[in-house]
Amino acid sequence: MSAVFKTEVGRAAVQSAYRALLVDWPLAIEQFRVPTRFGETHVVACGPKGAPPLVALHGAQANAAAYLGDAAVWSRDFRVYAIDMIGEAGLSAEIRPALDGDAHALWLDDVLDGLGVTRAAFVGTSLGGWLALDYATRRPQRVERLALLCPSGIGRQKNLLLKVLPLLLLGPWGMNKVRELVFGPRPAMPTPLQQRFGALMELIGRHIRIRIVTIPRLTDAQLAALPPALVIIGGKDVLLDSRDTKARLEQHAPAARAVFLPEGYHYLPGRTEPIAAFLRQPPVG
C-alpha cells in the first residue's frame, strides 16, 4: 500500500496527469532520476547549465510543476532544479521520514551530490520552506540564500481541522470553501495552463494521504544563524500564524527580511519578480 496515495488508481491518475503537464509545459526542461539512500528522486531542470544553481522545493500535496511558471523567469539567471519531494505527489520515492531528524537533510545531500551542486540558493513554499530552513541550519555551507513563501517552521501552526470539518461534510461546495480558505479566490480568467495545473492540484487533493504532523520550528539561535533570506507571508494564512513568523524573524533573524502581505493567503502567486530580484543580489561577504 502506498504511503502517499489512498489507492493505486489514484496514484496512477495523479502521476499520469503530472507527466502530461510536464510534456506540454511551454518551457524547455530536462528531467532527471537521482538515486538517493531513500530511493529515486525526480528533478525537473531548466536554464543554462553553467548558471548559478537554484533549488526549488514545493509544498505538501504538490510537485515540481508548482514552480515551472516561475522557473521561466528565474532560469534567465539560474540553473533551476525543481525537486519532487519524497513522500509527496510527484515522481519521487513514496517514503515519508520523520521531520524531527536529519533524514531530509541526508536526502537533499544525496540529491545535490547527484546533480553536482555543492552550494545553491533555495526557494521554498510552505513545507518546502521548512525543508529549505532545515537544510540551511544543518548544512549552512551549502545554502547561499533563501527565498521563502509562507514557510513552515518559524511561526506557530494553526489548527485548521476544527474549522474545516463541518465544510468537509458538505460535498463539493464544502471542498471549494476549504480550498478558498487556504488558497484564496480562484482567478477570474485563468489561462489554459492555470486550468490544467488547477485540475492537477484538485486531483492530488482527492487522492493523496494528507500529512497530519507537527512541523519542527527553528530555535531563536537557528534563526539568528540563517543566511540572507526573503520571507513572504500572508495575513490571511489559515495554516500558519504569519504575525508570529514576522515577529520572530524581526527579533531573531538579522539576515532575513519579512514581507507581510495583509490580504495574502497561504498561496501567494505573483511573487516571481520580487524573488528574482532578491536572488540576483550579489553574495554577502
Image (tube, helix red, strand yellow):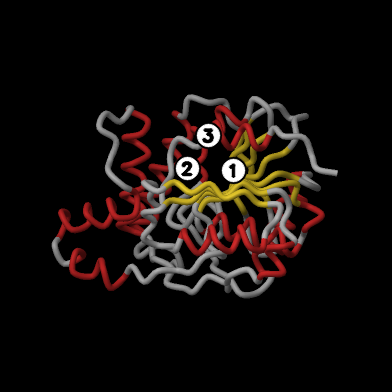
Can you give x and y, in whole percent of width and height, for residue 125 in the image? 52, 51
Between 273 and 247, the residue placed more toward the observer is: 247
Q: If you read the primary sequence from the N terminus, does the residue marked by circle 2 or circle 3 appear first?
A: 2
Mark 3, residue position: 272
Mark 2 vs mark 3, CA separation in Å = 12 Å
**Marks 2 and 1 close (CB-CB < 8 Å):** yes
Q: Secondary structure at mark 1?
A: strand
Q: CA distance from mark 3 to mark 1?
A: 15 Å
Dot 2 corresponds to which residue? 66
Other-residue count near label 1 (Cα within 10 Å), few / some / many at <14 / 14–19 / ≥20:
many
| Residue occupying image coordinates x 61% and y 46% | 230
Residue sitting at x 77%, y 51% = 113
Q: CA distance from mark 2 to mark 1?
A: 9 Å
Mark 2 or mark 1, which has the lower sequence index?
Answer: 2
Amino acid at the residue labelled 3: Thr
Q: Which residue is mark 1?
A: 82
Mark 3 or mark 1, earlier in chain: 1
Three-letter code for the amino acid on which mark 1 is drawn: Ala
Give amino acid for label 2.
Ala
Question: Which residue is painted at 50% across and 56% down in the image?
Answer: 126
